[in-house]
Amino acid sequence: MVVPYLNVEARWEDAPDQGLLGEKGGRGFPYCTIMNADGEVIWEVRPESADVFSKAVANANKLAGFQAKVAKNPEDKVAAASAALLDAIGRQQRQEPDLDDLVEHTKVEGVDKEILAAFEAWREEKAMMKALRRPSSSYEFFKNTPPKNAEGLIGAYFYLQVAMGAVDEEDAKTAKDVFARAQKIIESDEAIAKRLARFVEQVEKKMKEIDG
């Protein structure tokens, strides 16, 4: 059962639950979490769409199940590895565990392939996030290690950034390729389209430098 709760950091003198954002590990707004019955955050999600949120709830339930197995049998290596990997994937603003330790968990025989694939996608997204600082770094990242799982808001934004960097490098082929990839993601999701509308306009204007 999911019980929705909206906390507003209003800073009113008699407002309830002020400071809850920081207490739960959040560092900025919006901060959407899924907590267990003990009030512990077990998953964080960017609520981009109903599908994204539903997937997060399903993953949180899966994580809780593995955590329960570990609590019952601490020697269950598959459950422990699965819980560790899912826990990492479900972190956005909370402190992340050590990557080397997580990689060791991927080597445990018996971990579900879907969890391993989700972890690799999470690692890739983290690397993309670092590259998003500048169009030049996004372009360099794309040319050196083309992402396999760029999707959603982050994927669309990443490809737009790469397009900007490609134009600066006079790489028309890459600019057109990644801009088409961004458009495909954006056209499939109305919320992402609205969120990135202004940036798309900027990129389209930039693209004219190679068209003309």
Image (cartoon, rainbow, N blue to C red):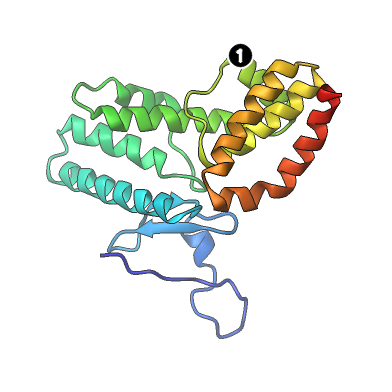
Relative to residue 126, is residue 212 drawn left or right?
right
Q: Residue at x 32, y 36 (%)?
A: 84
Furthest toward the left, the residue is 73
Depicted 97 relative to depicted 2: above or below? above
User: Can residue 153 be seen from the camera position used here?
Assistant: no
Q: Residue at x 21, y 43 (%)?
A: 66
Judged from the image, the secondary structure of the residue bearing numbered disc 1 is helix
Depicted 178 relative to depicted 185: above or below? above
Q: Indicate the position of residue 201 as horizontal and vertical percent values.
A: 76, 43
Q: Indicate the position of residue 26 as horizontal and vertical percent values.
A: 52, 55
User: Can residue 81 be seen from the camera position used here?
Assistant: yes
Relative to residue 125, is residue 109 drawn left or right?
left
Depicted 66 relative to depicted 149: above or below? below
Report the front residue among 178 and 28: 178
Q: Quadrant of residue 35?
A: bottom left
Depicted 3 relative to depicted 102: above or below? below
Report the front residue among 75 and 148: 148
Relative to residue 168, is residue 46 drawn left or right?
left
Furthest toward the front, the residue is 212
Q: Indicate the position of residue 30 as horizontal and vertical percent values.
A: 56, 59
Furthest toward the top, the residue is 144
Relative to residue 54, is residue 140 drawn left or right?
right
Q: Amino acid at mark 1?
A: Asn
- The image quadrant where one finds the C terminus is top right
Furthest toward the bottom, the residue is 14
Q: Residue at x 75, y 25 (%)?
A: 165
Report the front residue among 87 and 175: 175
**Residue, disc 1:** 144
> Alpha-carbon neighbours of circle 1 within 10 Å: few (<14), some, or many (≥20)?
few
Q: Quadrant of residue 50?
A: bottom left
